[in-house]
Image (cartoon, helix red, strand yellow):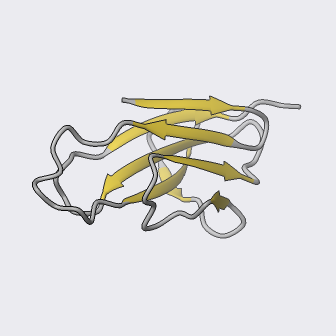
Protein backbone atom coordinates (compact mmCIF):
# COMPACT_ATOMS: atom_id res chain seq x y z
CA UNK A 1 0.00 0.00 0.00
CA UNK A 2 1.54 3.28 -1.15
CA UNK A 3 0.31 6.77 -0.22
CA UNK A 4 1.43 9.95 -1.94
CA UNK A 5 0.96 13.63 -1.15
CA UNK A 6 1.92 15.92 -4.05
CA UNK A 7 2.36 19.67 -4.45
CA UNK A 8 4.06 21.81 -7.13
CA UNK A 9 7.63 20.60 -6.70
CA UNK A 10 7.63 17.88 -4.05
CA UNK A 11 6.00 14.61 -3.11
CA UNK A 12 5.82 12.71 0.17
CA UNK A 13 5.59 8.94 -0.13
CA UNK A 14 4.64 6.52 2.62
CA UNK A 15 4.21 2.76 2.31
CA UNK A 16 3.60 -0.30 4.43
CA UNK A 17 6.35 -2.80 5.15
CA UNK A 18 6.09 -6.27 3.58
CA UNK A 19 3.85 -8.71 5.44
CA UNK A 20 6.85 -11.02 5.85
CA UNK A 21 10.49 -10.08 6.25
CA UNK A 22 11.59 -13.62 5.43
CA UNK A 23 13.18 -13.80 8.86
CA UNK A 24 15.65 -11.06 7.97
CA UNK A 25 16.34 -8.02 10.09
CA UNK A 26 18.17 -6.03 7.41
CA UNK A 27 15.17 -4.80 5.41
CA UNK A 28 15.80 -1.47 3.69
CA UNK A 29 14.20 0.38 0.78
CA UNK A 30 15.45 2.02 -2.38
CA UNK A 31 13.39 4.71 -4.13
CA UNK A 32 13.65 4.79 -7.92
CA UNK A 33 12.59 8.03 -9.63
CA UNK A 34 11.60 8.19 -13.31
CA UNK A 35 10.40 11.19 -15.33
CA UNK A 36 7.79 10.06 -17.87
CA UNK A 37 6.07 11.34 -21.00
CA UNK A 38 2.48 12.57 -20.66
CA UNK A 39 1.16 9.22 -21.93
CA UNK A 40 3.36 7.34 -19.44
CA UNK A 41 4.91 5.22 -22.19
CA UNK A 42 8.45 6.64 -22.18
CA UNK A 43 10.31 7.06 -18.91
CA UNK A 44 13.89 7.97 -18.05
CA UNK A 45 15.78 8.28 -14.76
CA UNK A 46 15.18 11.58 -12.98
CA UNK A 47 18.90 12.30 -12.80
CA UNK A 48 20.59 14.93 -10.65
CA UNK A 49 18.78 17.85 -9.08
CA UNK A 50 16.09 15.80 -7.32
CA UNK A 51 16.59 15.63 -3.55
CA UNK A 52 15.44 12.81 -1.28
CA UNK A 53 14.98 13.20 2.46
CA UNK A 54 16.25 11.43 4.44
CA UNK A 55 17.88 9.58 1.48
CA UNK A 56 17.14 7.69 -1.75
CA UNK A 57 18.89 4.39 -1.08
CA UNK A 58 19.08 2.20 2.01
CA UNK A 59 16.07 3.75 3.75
CA UNK A 60 15.20 2.13 7.08
CA UNK A 61 11.85 3.92 7.37
CA UNK A 62 8.73 3.58 5.21
CA UNK A 63 8.51 7.22 4.17
CA UNK A 64 10.49 9.65 2.05
CA UNK A 65 10.14 13.25 0.88
CA UNK A 66 11.24 14.07 -2.66
CA UNK A 67 11.93 17.72 -3.47
CA UNK A 68 12.96 19.97 -6.36
CA UNK A 69 10.69 18.28 -8.90
CA UNK A 70 9.63 20.12 -12.07
CA UNK A 71 6.06 21.45 -12.22
CA UNK A 72 3.65 19.92 -14.76
CA UNK A 73 5.76 16.78 -15.08
CA UNK A 74 4.81 13.10 -14.75
CA UNK A 75 6.97 11.11 -12.36
CA UNK A 76 6.86 7.44 -11.46
CA UNK A 77 8.39 6.32 -8.18
CA UNK A 78 9.18 2.69 -7.42
CA UNK A 79 9.87 1.43 -3.93
CA UNK A 80 12.12 -1.63 -3.75
CA UNK A 81 12.61 -3.79 -0.67
CA UNK A 82 16.37 -4.37 -0.70
CA UNK A 83 16.32 -7.93 0.65
CA UNK A 84 14.05 -9.10 -2.17
CA UNK A 85 11.23 -10.40 0.05
CA UNK A 86 8.60 -8.08 -1.41
CA UNK A 87 7.55 -6.98 -4.86
CA UNK A 88 8.15 -3.41 -5.89
CA UNK A 89 5.39 -0.84 -5.53
CA UNK A 90 5.04 2.14 -7.83
CA UNK A 91 3.03 5.33 -7.96
CA UNK A 92 2.70 7.85 -10.80
CA UNK A 93 2.27 11.48 -9.79
CA UNK A 94 1.94 14.70 -11.77
CA UNK A 95 3.23 17.87 -10.17
CA UNK A 96 0.99 20.95 -10.28
CA UNK A 97 1.63 24.60 -10.94
CA UNK A 98 1.99 26.85 -7.89
Q: Position of residue 25 (x, y in %)?
A: 23, 62
Give the camera-side residue of 69 and 40: 69
Report the label total: 0
Q: Position of residue 73 (x, y in %)?
A: 68, 40
When asked about the image quadrant of residue 81, the answer is: bottom left
- Rendered position, 86 above or below 83: above
When asked about the image quadrant of residue 9, the answer is: top right
Q: Position of residue 45 (x, y in %)?
A: 52, 61
Give the camera-side residue of 62 and 81: 62
Give the camera-side residue of 40 and 7: 7
Q: Residue at x 29, y 46 (%)?
A: 88
Q: Residue at x 57, y 43 (%)?
A: 75
Residue 22 seen anywhere in this rendered image of the structure: yes
Q: Residue at x 49, y 29 (%)?
A: 3
Residue 40 seen anywhere in this rendered image of the structure: no
- Rendered position, 66 above or below 51: above
Q: Residue at x 54, y 40 (%)?
A: 13
In this rendering, position of residue 19 left or right of residue 6 = left
In this rendering, position of residue 72 left or right of residue 90 = right
Q: Position of residue 46 (x, y in %)?
A: 59, 59
Give the camera-side residue of 75 and 37: 75
- Quadrant holding the C terminus: top right
- Quadrant holding the N terminus: top left
Q: For the view shown, which residue lies furthest in the left direction?
A: 22
- Rendered position, 4 above or below 81: above
- Rendered position, 19 above or below 67: above
When asked about the image quadrant of residue 17, the answer is: top left
Amino acid sequence: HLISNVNETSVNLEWTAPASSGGRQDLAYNVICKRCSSDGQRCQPCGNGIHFSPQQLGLRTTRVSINDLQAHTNYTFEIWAVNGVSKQMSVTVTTNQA
